[in-house]
Amino acid sequence: MKNYSLLICLLTLLGQPTMAWQGPASKAKKYKVVLDAGHGGKDPGTRGKSLKEKDVVLPVTLMVGKYLETLTDNIEVIYTRKKDVYSHPKVRAIMANEAEADLFVSIHANAMNPGYESVSGTEVFVMGTKNEGRNFEVAKRENSVILLEENYEEIYQGFDPNSPEIDIMFSIQQEAYQENSIILADNIDQQFIKRAGRKSRGVKQSSLWVLWSTYMPSVLIELGYLTNPKEEKDLGNKEVQDYLASAIFRAIRDYFEYIESTGN
């Protein structure tokens, strides 16, 4: 009888599903985002009647970082600047590359030549070779900051920001990150429309040195035109800045949720 009872007990135990040992709980992946407030210090960027680009983009960038730091637990924020200081684009790119960042987001404000003060709207740029017309003008302006360096030809290895032929080298360098860069750019563009209520000029491609030299998905954001009087007033408004920052934050958050859901 005792042996029979023991047999029944063993059969019952063997019939139960086994629980495999899972080991220590694995930590969620921590993503690194480099936030780059464009220009700074001796480089004011574009100008409106009363505002300088460097002074508009810094508070927006800091607000994006604050949202990421307080409202997510899987994103580490790295700033290229938190004050009105200058660092050339190569330093910003090196910071992102050495940190092995998952995203590089450079935040700027736009401008037009006299006579085109009515032009307004946000734009989001990814690396690409479509440098015709207005896209080439943006590329020349954003890339021209490297000419502030006394030895820029040595630092930038002969890179000429005014040369359309540089497109070929750009396209080869950034091809690996193009798809994810576009996903993030589309997210930001849609958030600007839906969350911030801004006029969108769309997602565009242009040969921008700071994007080309970062080895990760990267975008350059133009918050609006300081040469448009109404938009300049908006960009100086703290509430508008907060809406823009919130839109960028949501786009970055949603981007990583998408990456996790698809395993990209």
Image (tube, helix red, strand yellow):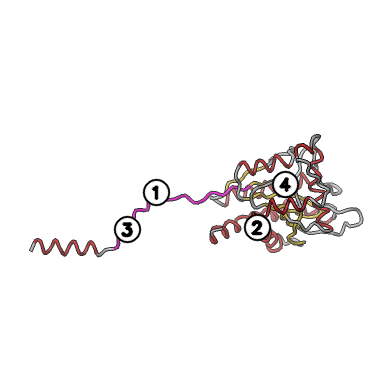
Q: Amino acid at mark 3?
A: Met
Quarter of the C terminus within the rendering: bottom right
Q: CA distance from mark 4 to mark 3?
A: 51 Å
* Mark seen at residue 19: 3
User: Does the residue at mark 1 contact the one at mark 3 (Cβ under 8 Å)?
Assistant: no
Farthest residue toward the left?
Answer: 1
* Mark seen at residue 24: 1
Is 36 located above or below residue 136 in the figure? above
The residue shown at (69%, 42%) is: 92
* Mark seen at residue 210: 4
Q: Which quadrant of the structure image shows residue 132?
A: bottom right
Q: Viewer-nearest of labels 4 and 1?
A: 4
Q: Which residue is mark 2?
A: 184
Q: Amino acid at mark 2?
A: Leu
Q: Earlier in the sequence, mark 4 or mark 1?
A: 1
Where is residue 39? Give x, y as percent.
Answer: 76, 43
